[in-house]
Amino acid sequence: MLRIAVPNKGSLSEPASAMLHEAGYKQRKDRRELVLVDGENEVEFFFLRPRDIAVYVGSGKLDIGITGRDLLLDSGAAAEEILQLGFAASTFRYATRPGTAGGVGDFGGMTIATSFPGLVAKHLADNGVDASVVRLDGAVETAIQLGVAEIIADVVETGTTLRNAGLDIIGEPILESEAVVIRRTGAPADDPKVRQFLRRMQGVLVARRYVMMDYDIRAERVERAVALTPGLESPTISPLHHEGWVAVRSMVPARDAQRIMDDLYDLGARAILTTGIHACRL
């Protein structure tokens, strides 16, 4: 049975469970459940603190897990990223009071407060900077106001919280993070249960990005229409009972669907329909 770690709370929890549900896996109904067995799919889910997941997976106690790239790298665990999941995107950056420093090269001898000490310490070492790192959980932006540190390193979305605290973002991003699937470093790459899990998750990713588009068009215009809707390999084209017309079916990117429908209509296509894709295998 495949043993999978899933975030039990925070910004990773609900999107991860939703994606697993779309992939056909049973998910917990009570947030107090810590373990859930999905016997039909031969999977056992363990709901853990997101920060601990890389440690469990890296130790080999669990086969794979879902966590953030930032949490994986901060943990220092013997685990590696094997699939990006496309949600919980964030940017990890430094911030300080205006005039304190212009970039990481100016941090020598300063103290940096962060909830990700492992990640920051590695970034400083990679840049040859000798600075102190203090771990704080929660709102690290108050560390400068209270004199605990001169610099903070934190997840930045809009930057509003930092600006409200009188801080400026400085330097290049330390890391671009998102939710990822991880496994133990050096684990067998050909595990059939892991491969099946990854195929299902990849199927959800594709299904979320594409819609199925159907339309009717005159046969003499089909090549121009197909240029707009090439599909992943090629579209399905079927003759209609009405002579001179064909029906076309193709997968198109969801973000472009409305524009493509407009272009097809201008080309003479009619009965243009889009439907969502709930699952797929490519």
Image: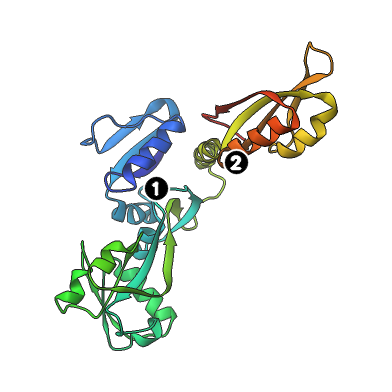
For the residue pair 167 and 238, the one nearer the viewer reads as: 167
From this viewpoint, which residue is outermost toward the left? 146
| Badge number at residue 256 | 2
Residue under label 1, please give it: 66
Q: Position of residue 196 (x, y in %)?
A: 53, 37
Q: At numbered mark 2, what does the secondary structure look like: helix, strand or loop? A: helix
Q: Amino acid at mark 1?
A: Ile
Query: What percent of the width, then of the height, locates residue 261?
Result: 64, 33
Identify the residue at horizontal 31%, vertical 41% (top origin).
Answer: 46
**Vertically, is 137 above or below 180?**
below
Q: Quadrant of residue 14?
A: top left
- The quadrant where residue 1 appears: top left
Quadrant including the C terminus:
top right
Q: At which x and y percent is residue 41?
A: 44, 29
Task: Please indicate, yes or no, whether residue 140 appears anywhere in the rendered image.
Answer: yes
Q: Is residue 1 visible?
A: no
Image location of residue 138, percent across then percent down: 21, 61
